Image (cartoon, helix red, strand yellow):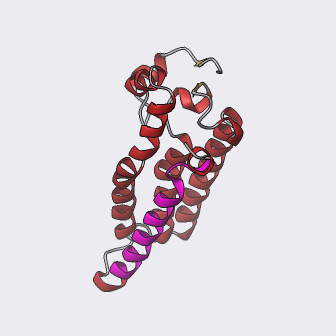
């Protein structure tokens, strides 16, 4: 695993795919004219602001739990990693994108958020293969008990732990 892969993983590729699909959604919006989500600017901004704050908090919690220097060197299963395997990606896919869809105020952006969420499951496979190679015994068990982007019920009941460092 090279340093770039270890630190950034599948993030840059996924971001490019997400932005390309957002641009496509914008083009489709102008062509087909789906109805607005809400007539209230205030509601849309409150939803977006809440999603942005939630995204920021989860991203900071993730960075504190697994600093960039430890990525690919430690299998952390505490903090947000207790609940999901990819909390930073989950923050954007499960919080920010939905808030952005509401702010942009068209149902095509909700379809975009659903599509992007699905595509990230495909995008993340290469990163998960790297983790399986780095932690051949621990990572498969971690995958069985922890969801990629959405917590599994058993991850909510599991006691937090940190895999030992090499």
Q: Dividing the picture into quarters, in which one does residue 34 lie?
A: bottom left
Q: Is residue 62 left or right of residue 152?
A: right
Q: Answer whether residue 8 is magenta in the image.
A: yes
Q: Is residue 159 above or below residue 148?
A: above
Q: Quadrant of the C terminus?
A: top right
Residue most extreme to the front: 2
Q: Is residue 29 above or below residue 93?
A: below
Front one among 51 and 129: 129
Q: Quadrant of the N terminus?
A: top right
Q: Is residue 81 above or below residue 160?
A: below
Q: Position of residue 19 (x, y in %)?
A: 47, 69
Front one among 108 and 63: 63
Q: Position of residue 79 (x, y in %)?
A: 62, 28
User: Can residue 84 be seen in this snapshot?
Assistant: no
Magenta span of residues: 7-29
Q: Dividing the picture into quarters, in which one does residue 70 lie?
A: top right
Residue most extreme to the left: 32
Residue shown at the point (48%, 35%) measured from the top left? 131
Q: Position of residue 149 (x, y in %)?
A: 44, 40
Q: Dividing the picture into quarters, in which one does residue 60 lie?
A: top right
Question: What secondary structure is the stretch in magenta mostly built from?
Answer: helix
Q: Answer whether residue 63 is magenta in the image.
A: no
Residue most extreme to the bottom: 31
Please count the marks in the image.
0
Q: Is residue 26 left or right of residue 6?
A: left
Residue shown at the point (47%, 16%) measured from the top left? 157
């Amino acid at each position: 695993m090279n340093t770039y892969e270890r630190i950034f993983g599948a993030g840059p590729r996924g971001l490019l795919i997400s932005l390309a699909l957002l641009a496509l959604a914008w083009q489709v919006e102008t062509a087909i004219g789906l109805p607005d989500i809400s007539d209230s600017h205030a509601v849309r901004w409150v939803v977006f602001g809440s999603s942005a704050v939630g995204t920021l908090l989860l991203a900071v919690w993730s960075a504190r739990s697994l600093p960039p220097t430890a990525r690919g060197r430690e299998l952390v299963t505490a903090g947000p990693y207790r609940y999901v395997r990819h909390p930073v990606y989950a923050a954007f896919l499960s919080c920010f994108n939905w808030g952005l869809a509401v702010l942009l105020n068209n149902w095509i952006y909700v379809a975009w958020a659903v599509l992007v969420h699905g595509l990230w499951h495909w995008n993340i496979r290469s990163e998960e293969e790297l983790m399986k190679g780095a932690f051949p015994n621990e990572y498969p068990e971690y995958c069985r008990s922890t969801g990629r982007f959405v917590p599994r019920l058993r991850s909510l009941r599991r006691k937090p732990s940190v895999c030992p460092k090499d």
